[in-house]
Image: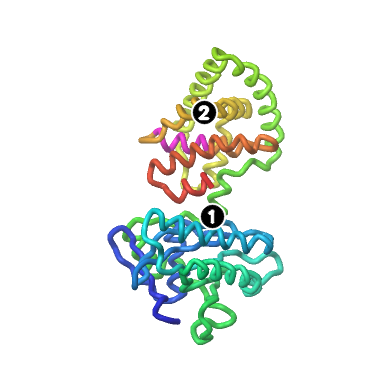
Amino acid sequence: MNKHHEPTGHTEDHQVTLRGPAELADALPYMLGYHPTDSVVMVALHGSRGRFGGRVRLGIPHSPNEWPPVARQLAQCLIEGGGRRSKRPDGIVLFLCQDPADGESPRRVMERLRPFAQRLRAACGALDVPVYEALCISGGRFWSYCCPDERCCPAEGNALAVSGTSVMAAAAAYAGVQVRGSLRDMEARFEPLTSPAAGDQRKALDRAAAAVVPRILDQEGRRRVAEETIALAHALMARFAGAPSGPDRLAADRADDLLITHDEAAAVILGLQDRQTRDRGAEWMEGPEAETALRLWRALSRRCVGPYAEHAAAPLTLAGWVSWSVGDEPAARVALG
C-alpha cells in the first residue's frame, strides 16, 4: 500500500483518518448511510490528505457491453460535474460491491468485475484524475485492485471488520450517524406487492382509472377529484397516526399495508397523478405529519402493481421529498432513485 491510502473523512466536526483498504471498506456504509448492494460507488478525494468529497453510486450493469460507456459517464459525472460546483478532485476511491450469485464464490465475483474496475480507472485517468484505490467487496470479504502486495492484500481477500468495532464505527456512533441496513432492504420498502393481493389491487386500479379519468377531463371534475384525493390521503394519515409503527421495518410495512383497502389506495394513486394535487400532498413534510405521510407514500408505492408501476413515480417522489425535508438524505436518494 502507498501513502495515498490515507483519505480523511469528516463526521460532523470530528475528523477520522482512514489508513488502508480495510478501513476504507469499513467506512463505506457510514459514508452512504447504508450498505450498497450491487453497486459501483466512486468517492472524490481532495487535497494532499485525501479529504472525502462528492460521490456517485449506480447499480452495476449486468452486461459487460455496458461497462465502457457507464465508466465514462460516471467519471464525467463525478469529475466534471462536481468541478462545476467545487474544486476538481485530486483523486478517487472506487468501490465495487456485489454479493455472489448461487454457486459463485466471492473471489469469482472479484475477478468477474475486474475488467469493469479497469474501465473505471481508465475513464478517470483519461480526465487526469487518478484512482488511488479500487476495492471489490463481496461475501463479507474485500480485495484491492490496486495493491499487488499479497502480504496485506492476499489472493483470497481479507475479511471485513466485525460490525461496530472499527474507528469509523466508533466515530459514527459518537456523532449519531446510523447505517440503515442494505440498499436492497431499503429499496424493498417501495417495491410493488408480489403477494396474491397484487391481483386484487390491480383490479381496484382498473376500476379507479375507469371512474377518475372521465371526471378529470373537465375543470370542475378535476377540482373535485383533487379535493377527494387530499381528503382521503389525510384520513389515511390519521389512521396511520393511530397505529404507531414498530422498530421492525418489514413488520411495520406489512401492518401499514393492512390499514389501506385496495380501493382507497387506487383512488389516491390515481388522484396523485395530477401535479397540483401532488404539490398539495408535498406540504406534509414537517413535524408529526412528516412521518405518517412518509408511511403513506411508501405504502402507496407498494400498491402500484402490474401496468400501473409507472404511477409509483408520484408517491416515490413524495417519499423522497419528505425524507429529504426531515434530514434523511440516504432514504431520500433511495426513494428518488
Q: Is 314 situated above or below 152?
A: above
Name the amino acid, label 1. Answer: Leu
Chain part drawn in magenta: 289-297
Q: Nearer the viewer, mark 1 or mark 2?
A: 2
Q: Nearer the viewer, residue 24 or 77?
A: 77
Residue 326 located left or right of residue 303: left
Q: What secondary structure is found at the residue carrying circle 2?
A: helix
Q: What element does badge 1 sit on? A: helix
Residue that label 1 marks = 183
According to the picture, the residue beneath numbered tag 2 turns out to be 275
Q: Residue at x 46, y 61 (%)?
A: 79
Residue 295: give x, y in percent of width and height.
Answer: 49, 38
> Does the residue at mark 1 contact the one at mark 2 (Cβ under 8 Å)?
no
Q: Residue at x 43, y 38 (%)?
A: 291
Q: What is the three-letter code of the residue carrying label 2?
A: Arg
Residue 48 vs residue 205: left or right?
Answer: left
